[in-house]
Image (cartoon, helix red, strand yellow):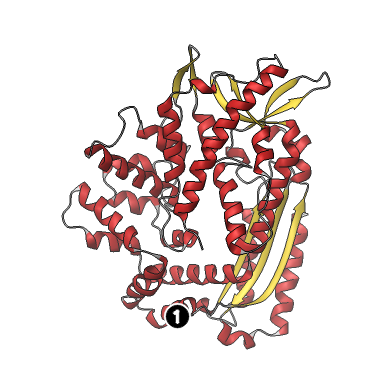
Amino acid sequence: MHSRFEHSLGVLHLSSEILNNLRLNAIRYQKKYDDGHVFGHIDQIPKHNIQELRLAALMHDIGHGPVSHQFESFMPCKHEFSDVLPTAYHSIIDVLSKPEQKVEHEQLSLLFSLMIYHDLRKQGKVDDEINIENVLKIIEKRYGDQQNIEEINGKATDILPLMTSIISSCPIDADRMDYLLRDGYFSGVKCGIYDYNRLFMSIVPVEEQGKLYLAYKESGIDSIAEFIGARSSLFSQVYYHKTNRAFATMLSTLCEIMQSKDPQNVIIADVTDRIVDHSDESFIDALKEFYLACSDDYFLNDKVGEWIDISDTEAVNKKILDDIINRHPWSKVYEAKHSVYKANIADKENKAWKSQLTGLLTSVLQPHFKPHEFAVDIVSDCAFKDLDKTEVKLLVKDLKNRYEIKPLIECGDKLNQYQIIKYCIRVFVDRDIKERVTPEIIYKINEIVVKQIALLN
């Protein structure tokens, strides 16, 4: 078993390794090619910027709550959070474009990073050259003015694209590099394995129009493909394993029932109850107290149970919660998998298709089961997830053996063969009533799924 603290230390280490290899590879490249593509002054990046990168790596996941990503089911929407969040912190949730968007762990990571910084400043433990705004922009690339201009080699250069790509980018970054190896090892499966040294040999820094970017040499495509394959295997065998998804859907169902009966977000209500006065510091202290108290065990056994006790669906919610705590997952009564191979790297998972299929399958199940007795779970994974947000480049050789810098999203001719979009469709029901799932119900479900899958091809 491991924690996010260990993962954060790993990301910190890998971020430093990536930066060091960028410097070494730039020297090697310039000895071989004199085309001016590679940026040869990584060693001139100010020391405080490197420290900001390391701080961002260390704190990028600090906003995660208990039960990992499933906690976000309980999170408030932007408009709910902005009503109670002190005005001084509103820039943190301004990265969310719509009022109804759920606040996610990334925004809490910004908030807690800012809190820690202010606490350390009061104690005189922060270097005056450290700019917390730069740290926040590396953690969340949508934050602030989205640039970090430094004078390097006598020229104003925006180093932020490089820094954000080291921590978070598609298809490879320090975050993914660490959790693939770590999760594969601790889950005991022989997947998620790749050769990070080969990846390190493939990266170089490049500059375009006054901006510094991370780029991969075309010769590193096989290493990129190996990494993509390792990630895809880990998602299929671990993250999307039926037992893991069963508990995830149970938590989501529990949250939906609670929120449908009480419009006030449970986290907002809990934090508000902890406030001593109406000062900004009191809210921040209450939020910190809530997060520090909520280990996985305390959250499930005490906190969620406390929220259930004050709801008018106590018996229903208690049954689901008891099954989670006692490790009695809902039964998988139907499963279908479909993969789209060699699609365009710019293609994404079809969210509208997933939503439509969920609705169709729910309509088959509703006459036979109550809403709290079943769940339709459709998960997907895209090899080049978030490619439209990445600023990573590819150094591509032309017919004259010269390199050209191209955005990764424009390199489909090189990468489309590695694009895989996977869909996994499952139906779960409460294990105590699974005998009520008749062959006729399964036939109807399968008939719908087969027809809908045909629309993807």
Q: Amino acid at mark 1?
A: Asp
- Residue 105 location in percent, x, y? 43, 51
Residue at the outermost top position? 154
Residue at left 70%, top 41%?
A: 224
**Quick one: label 1, few (<14), some, or many (20+) residues within 10 Å?**
some
Question: Can residue 96 be seen in this snapshot?
Answer: no
User: Percent position (x, y) of residue 349?
Assistant: 65, 51
Write down the residue under mark 1.
Answer: 322
Disc 1 secondary structure class: helix
| Quarter of the rendering containing residue 257 | bottom left
Residue located at (17% from left, 52% from top):
278
Q: Is residue 276 left or right of residue 39?
A: left
Q: Nearer the viewer, residue 27 or 324?
A: 27
In this view of the protein, which residue sits in the foreground, 90 or 418? Answer: 418
Q: Residue 293 in the image: x percent, y percent? A: 32, 63
Judge left or right: residue 98 versus residue 274: right
Indicate whether 39 appears above or below 191.
Answer: above
Q: Position of residue 253 (x, y in %)?
A: 49, 71
Determine the residue positioned at 73% across, 83% down: 439
Q: Is residue 70 visible?
A: yes
Residue plotted at (79% across, 44% down) = 417
Q: Nearer the viewer, residue 400 or 283?
A: 400
Q: Quadrant of residue 318?
A: bottom left
Q: Looking at the rendering, which quadrant does residue 378 occupy?
A: bottom right
Please state, as top left, top right, bottom left or bottom right, where the C terminus lies in the image: bottom right
Query: Against 217, is 95 above or below?
Result: below
